[in-house]
Amino acid sequence: MEQTDREADGFSFVDCEAQMEQVELSYHAVKEVLLHAGAELRAPIPGMIDILEQNSRIHRMAEQMIKATRYQNELYIVAEVQIPEAKDATLKTSDNRQL
């Protein structure tokens, strides 16, 4: 979660994407092992289902975090483009005084 904090020192969207890829690979590897173990009756099915559901929730949570980070990144890009324009413009009151 700390990696998705854009305000943190050393934030990198590329690092967030790389971490998501690792979560994705781990999720699929665990799922494959559990499904094989269940199919070969090496693991109790109810326990296997519980672990699969828990891993699925973790996987979805990571997906939602990276999705939110993408949206946040887009907002920052738009804001960074608009901020210089706002700094250049000077506000004036109705009697032409600059603020």
Image (cartoon, rainbow, N blue to C red):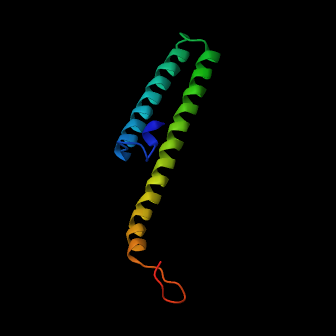
Say whether residue 94 is left or right of residue 2.
right
The residue lying at 47 percent from left, 48 percent from top is: 69
Say whether residue 74 is left or right of residue 54.
left
The quarter of the picture where residue 24 lies is: top left
The residue lying at 47 percent from left, 29 percent from top is: 27
Query: Among all residues in the image, which is located at the extreme bottom?
Result: 95
Of 26 and 73, the residue lying toward us: 73
The residue lying at 62 percent from left, 21 percent from top is: 50
Where residue 67 appears, as percent x and y from the top left, is: 49, 48
The quarter of the picture where residue 29 lies is: top left
Q: Is residue 21 above or below residue 48?
A: below
Where residue 76 appears, as percent x and y from the top left, is: 44, 58
Of 16 and 54, the residue lying toward us: 16
Say whether residue 80 is left or right of residue 93.
left
**What is the total number of numbered labels drawn onto the structure image?**
0
Where residue 21 appears, as percent x and y from the top left, is: 39, 37
Of 57 and 4, the residue lying toward us: 4
Query: Among all residues in the image, which is located at the extreme right?
Result: 46
Q: Is residue 83 above or below residue 48?
A: below
The residue lying at 41 percent from left, 31 percent from top is: 25
